Amino acid sequence: MSKRDYYEVLCVERTASEIEIKKAYRRLAMKHHPDRNPNDTEAEAKFKEAKEAYEVLSDAQKRAAYDQFGHAGVEQGAGMGGGPGGNFSDIFGDVFGDIFGGGGGGRRGERVYRGADLQYNLELSLEDAVHGKTVKIRVPTYVKCNKCNGSGAKQGSSPETCSTCHGVGQVRMQQGFFSLQQTCPTCHGTGKVIKDPCDACHGEGRIQEHKTLSVKVPAGVDTGDRIRLSNEGEAGQNGGPPGDLYVHVHVKPHDIFTREGSDLYCEVPINIATAALGGTLEVPTLDGRITLKVPPETQSGKLFRLRNKGVSSVRGGVQGDLLCRVIVETPVKLNARQKELLQEFQATLEEGGKNHSPKAHSWLDGVKKFFDDMKQNIGS
């Protein structure tokens, strides 16, 4: 039977921190441990499953291999399981070590730490988001110190095994019934002591600097999307793998278009003559100009759909449309002759009655009925 995903077993996200993984394991271990559930085979199986998942995800190197290759990457020499009758004090040593400053189980020797994930907020124009683009970004981060090759020790020397914990990184304390682990106070959990630190990184094994990266933005991204750059986060410690860089996309507002999913919207102002008589307009798209035919007697707010002139989503599917909403603009700053013509025009409209302005007359009829009903109700 295939194994469940380790992150699913512990009910954590794939980006969960080491502390979150430990907390999740502590909860499951205390709930399903055989000592608390005697003769319960289901609880025993869940305990073994959680312990197996924890032993992989709490080890930076094993976790990196699992993230890349799945179960196949950790099946050899992963030290899985531990029988159901495991010493209950071991659970406290593995899980509660952090309460006393612990950095991990002593059975794993010197601990390595995966580098932190980084986040970069990238602003894009609508055009770049729709068509895609390769952009360069400059990110502050920790990188491996080249002078000491990440060891933290001065050239010609090397870290020495801690004499207090003998390289384990933790010391065990007996307190009554329980055997507790805590971080070694001498090496602070690394298992090594640097007596002659590197003068470039001061024993850290990594230095802070800015690095320039090229980010390939795929066509169709939108605000809220993120791009993952593997191994471009902070450098790990003690030889641990680097973290990842997550580029969060934010599309800036556009002067003409508004995006909703795969569709684009824009407003197109037209004059009274064009609205009444019809005509053609040139409207913009992200791929150039296109001709829009406006039929006679077009009302303000009319929406015209231009097929396949929208956005092709980064997630695939049919290309969106461009929807143009025409807005009939009232003319301003009229001269005397224009006002005279409009007055003559207005007179001809009134002669035609409801034929020329059906909506206006319908609205007036509704208003008249409203007041008639109101008078009738007051009278009764």
Image (cartoon, rainbow, N blue to C red):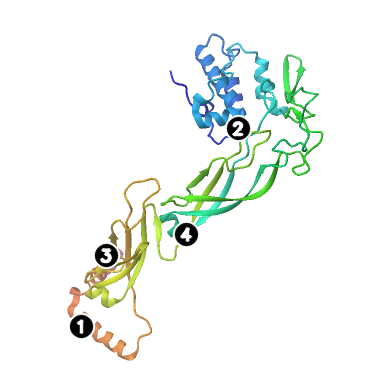
- What is the C-alpha distance between the residues marked 1 and 3? 32 Å
Badge 1 crowding class, 10 Å Cα cut-off, few under 14, some 14 to 19, many 20 or more, is few
Q: If you read the primary sequence from the N terminus, does the residue marked by circle 2 or circle 3 appear first?
A: 2
Considering only vertical position in the picture, is 296 above or below 264? below
The answer to whether residue 133 is left or right of residue 232 is: left
Q: Which residue is mark 1?
A: 348
Where in the figure is residue 197, as x and y percent of width and height? 79, 38
Q: Which residue is mark 4?
A: 125
Q: Secondary structure at mark 3?
A: helix
The quarter of the image holding the C terminus is bottom left
Q: Where on the picture, by quarter, is residue 61?
A: top right
C-beta proximity under 8 Å, tags 2 and 1: no
Q: Secondary structure at mark 4?
A: loop
- What is the C-alpha distance between the residues marked 4 and 2? 37 Å
C-beta proximity under 8 Å, tags 4 and 3: no
Give the residue at x 52% y 49%: 248
Q: Which residue is mark 2?
A: 20
Q: If you read the primary sequence from the N terminus, does the residue marked by circle 4 or circle 3 appear first?
A: 4
Q: Where on the picture, by quarter, is residue 116?
A: top right
Discs 1/4, front: 4
In depth, the one of 266 and 31 nearer the eye is: 266
- What is the C-alpha distance between the residues marked 2 and 3? 68 Å
The kind of residue on which mark 1 rests is Thr
Discs 4/3, front: 4
Q: Which residue is mark 3?
A: 373
In depth, the one of 51 and 231 nearer the eye is: 231
- What is the C-alpha distance between the residues marked 4 and 3? 56 Å
Where in the figure is residue 90, as x and y percent of width and height? 66, 17
- What is the C-alpha distance between the residues marked 1 and 4? 50 Å
